[in-house]
Image: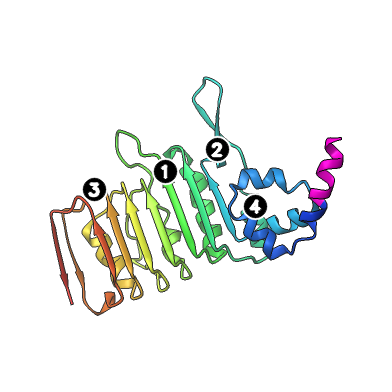
Amino acid sequence: MEEEIMDPAVDHISKLAVPVLQKILSSFLAKDVAQLNTLSKSLNSAWTTLSYLNFGYKFFYHQGDDDQWILAENITDLANRQNQKISIQKLWLTLPSSHWSSYIHGWINTLVSLNIKELILSVDTPNDGYNMILPEAIFAAKELNVLNLQGFKLELPHNNGIKYSSLRVLHLSKALLSEHFIRAVCESCSGLEDLKLNECHGLASLQIGGTSLSKLRSVWLDCLYDLHMYG
């Protein structure tokens, strides 16, 4: 009886246009979508071409008493989109600890190649400091519009090459950084409109401004002793 009730619903979903299905699926966590897409070919097609990927915390799960985090999904979803040349509009991912840094480097390289537009990436910060350094590859993301990071140690790339020509929103929280880093980022982001630093360490004062930040409209700087903005 349950199958008779479910079949019409599946048929109805299957008749929806792929863009409509993608809009619906973009509100789900990736792990949940992976279970749903087995219902119909149209759902699976919408998912495999979806450019909004929300992994959240469910990219990992915790199992047993051995305190081990295990991948609940693999990253082939990104690789598949890379093969299909599908640009990623948005990705949200939270890591349980810095022990996954080796995975992050590969994912960032893939995201940059997929022309990521919005990246929300956070890592739980340990009590002994911030020991995950943000991979340098992210500084080459020319199409990036929104960058929201939490819990990382932020350092300038060795060649000082920051190519955030499209960045409009920069939110950093619980990060370890320096004034030199922030100034270098600001100087490379002529289109920056929204800057937020929350509970960041290593930054006591900041001087920002000039023609390079002519579009800056919103500034939120927490735990900063001295701020000087000039036009």
Q: Amino acid at mark 2?
A: Phe
Q: Pointer 3: what residue?
A: 201
Q: Residues within 10 Å of mark 4 (few under 14, many from 20)?
A: some
Task: State the image coordinates of residue 40 (x, y, percent, origin top left).
Answer: 80, 51
**Outermost bottom residue:** 211
Q: Pointer 2: what residue?
A: 60
Instruction: Specify whether residue 8 is painted magenta.
Output: yes
Q: Which mark is residue 77?
A: 4
Q: Amino acid at mark 4?
A: Asp
Residue at position x 79%, y 49% from top? 9
Instruction: Specify whether residue 136 is painted magenta.
Output: no
Q: CA distance from mark 1 to mark 4?
A: 21 Å
Q: Amino acid at mark 3?
A: His
Q: Residues within 10 Å of mark 2 (few under 14, many from 20)?
A: some
In the rendered image, is residue 218 in sight? yes
Q: CA distance from mark 3 to mark 1?
A: 16 Å
Task: State the image coordinates of residue 15 (x, y, percent, origin top left).
Answer: 80, 60
Residue at position x 50%, y 56% from top? 108
SS at mark 3 in the image: loop
Q: CA distance from mark 3 to mark 4?
A: 35 Å
SS at mark 4 in the image: helix
Q: Which badge, 1 or 4, comes first in the chain's sequence?
A: 4
The span shown in magenta is 1-10
